[in-house]
Image: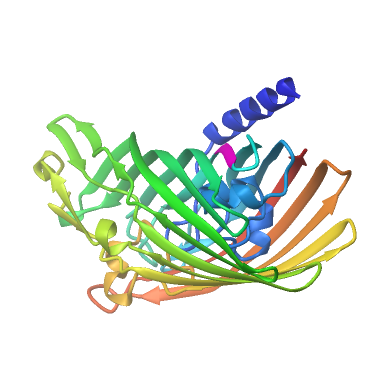
């Protein structure tokens, strides 16, 4: 058993370090595993797998495991996107996730999870319709490792917490002031934050969940140039989420979640240190993102060894028409997502899951400055293998 656990953990670490992720609520993933995606990301109150550590660590106390639960898998994201009709290259992204939770005793649960939680970017050879030679290439990838603990206070209440250790990678190449091409090469920085969570069984058919993720303070993104260092602070936003899970009959689960992501605090105006080192680089990056409220509902039905789920997720774009021209390199404008999930038990210990999520096409045209138009939709495929003993 110990050898299996170590091998699984090492495999998950190698996979997760191999790639970053892109996301759909702003630049945040709506789900990191197939079980979560199948519910449309509505998993705050009722944990679906060990990756609840990345959502609500208190959910570890509700996984029904005797000793250990492990979930390993990956997602494939296909986000076709355009700027003024010019299609972006690089339309497939790998998103690995690994998580393990351990039942220490009747009260204490320990675990860890790792995976891509956010990202965005484009790769457009010319953003000017009809020609103009103005390429824009951006990449942002955020990976989180989270050791966590949960404590079952009594049969109704469980509390949990995780330490969030984050690696953020960022590169940008765009046309700045005076038509000058600005190139900021790939840079990586670490940051730290925390997630606090709770679940409460109101009665046998109704359970509530609450989780708060602090702002993740990330070291300044620093880029070396021939004229000196250029740096700016780009942290990860705080978020607050609440959920209510209802089991109207055996084998049927319905959950509704509401989440507030505080983008405005970290993605409104970002001051650049030493902008004069690069011609065309503005002193302030005015992204102008608004806070976002996300609504998610998921339904799951068990049918013997199989279960099926449907989910819907909606959040108004944090980017408005007035901010389109400042966000040609992010295009984090997805709003409506519909998902389908399927799980099957292969044995008492092993099960597999698959989920497909489609984000419906959305487009925005700038209302201030040049009337640039950004457009995108998304397809996401998640596959997972779970082990519970």
Q: Horizontally, is 11 left or right of 24 in the view? A: right
- Residue 318 visible at all: no
> For the view shown, which residue lies furthest in the front direction?
154
Q: Residue 175: within the magenta?
A: no
- Given residues 342 and 200, the one toward you in this image is 200
Residue 7, placed above or below residue 261: above
Measuring 71% from the left and 58% from the top, which residue is drawn there? Answer: 355
Quarter of the image where one finds residue 238:
bottom left
Q: Residue furthest bottom?
A: 367
Identify the residue shown where x is 41% and y is 57%.
Answer: 212
Residue placed at 66% from the left, 55% from the top?
A: 48
Q: Which is the main secondary structure of the residues drawn in magenta?
A: strand
In front of the other: 66 or 6: 66
Q: Is residue 308 left or right of residue 50?
A: right
**Along the horizontal axis of the image, is 159 left or right of 173?**
right
What percent of the width, then of the height, locates residue 281?
A: 17, 49
Q: Which quarter shows the C terminus?
A: top right
Res 27 → quadrant: bottom left
Q: Which residues are magenta?
A: 108-112
Query: For the N terminus, which image quadrant?
Result: top right
Residue nearest the observer in this picture, 145 or 24: 145
């Amino acid at each position: 058993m110990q050898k299996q656990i170590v091998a699984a953990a090492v495999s998950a670490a190698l996979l997760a370090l191999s790639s970053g992720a892109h996301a759909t609520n702003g630049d945040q993933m709506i789900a990191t595993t197939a079980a979560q995606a199948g519910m449309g990301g509505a998993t705050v109150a009722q944990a679906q797998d060990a990756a609840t550590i990345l959502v609500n660590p208190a959910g570890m106390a509700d996984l029904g495991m005797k000793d250990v639960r492990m979930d390993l898998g990956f997602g494939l994201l296909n986000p076709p996107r355009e700027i003024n009709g010019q299609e972006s290259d690089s339309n497939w992204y790998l998103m690995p996730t690994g998580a393990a939770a351990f039942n220490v005793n009747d009260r204490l649960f320990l675990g860890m999870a790792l995976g891509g939680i956010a990202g965005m970017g484009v790769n457009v050879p010319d953003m000017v319709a009809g020609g103009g030679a103005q390429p824009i290439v951006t990449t942002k990838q955020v990976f989180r490792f989270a050791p966590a603990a949960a404590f079952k206070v009594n049969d109704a209440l469980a509390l949990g917490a995780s330490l969030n250790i984050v690696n953020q990678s960022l590169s940008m190449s765009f046309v700045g002031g005076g038509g000058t091409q600005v190139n900021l090469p790939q840079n990586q920085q670490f940051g730290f934050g925390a997630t606090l969570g709770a679940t409460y069984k109101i009665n046998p058919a109704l359970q509530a969940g609450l989780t708060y993720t602090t702002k993740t303070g990330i070291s300044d993104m620093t880029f070396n140039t021939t004229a000196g260092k250029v740096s700016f602070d780009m942290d990860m936003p705080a978020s607050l989420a609440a959920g209510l899970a209802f089991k109207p009959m055996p084998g049927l689960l319905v959950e509704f979640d509401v989440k507030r992501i505080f983008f405005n605090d970290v993605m409104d105006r970002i001051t650049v240190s030493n902008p004069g080192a690069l011609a065309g680089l503005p002193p302030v990056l005015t992204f102008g993102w608004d806070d976002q409220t996300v609504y998610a509902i998921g339904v799951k039905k068990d049918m013997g060894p199989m279960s099926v789920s449907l989910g819907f997720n909606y959040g108004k774009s944090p980017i408005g028409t007035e901010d389109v021209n400042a966000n040609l390199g992010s295009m984090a404008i997805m709003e409506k997502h519909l998902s389908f999930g399927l799980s099957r038990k292969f044995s008492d210990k092993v099960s597999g899951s698959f989920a497909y999520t489609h984000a419906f096409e959305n487009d925005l045209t700038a209302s201030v400055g040049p009337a640039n138009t950004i457009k995108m939709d998304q397809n996401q495929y998640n596959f997972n293998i779970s082990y519970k003993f």
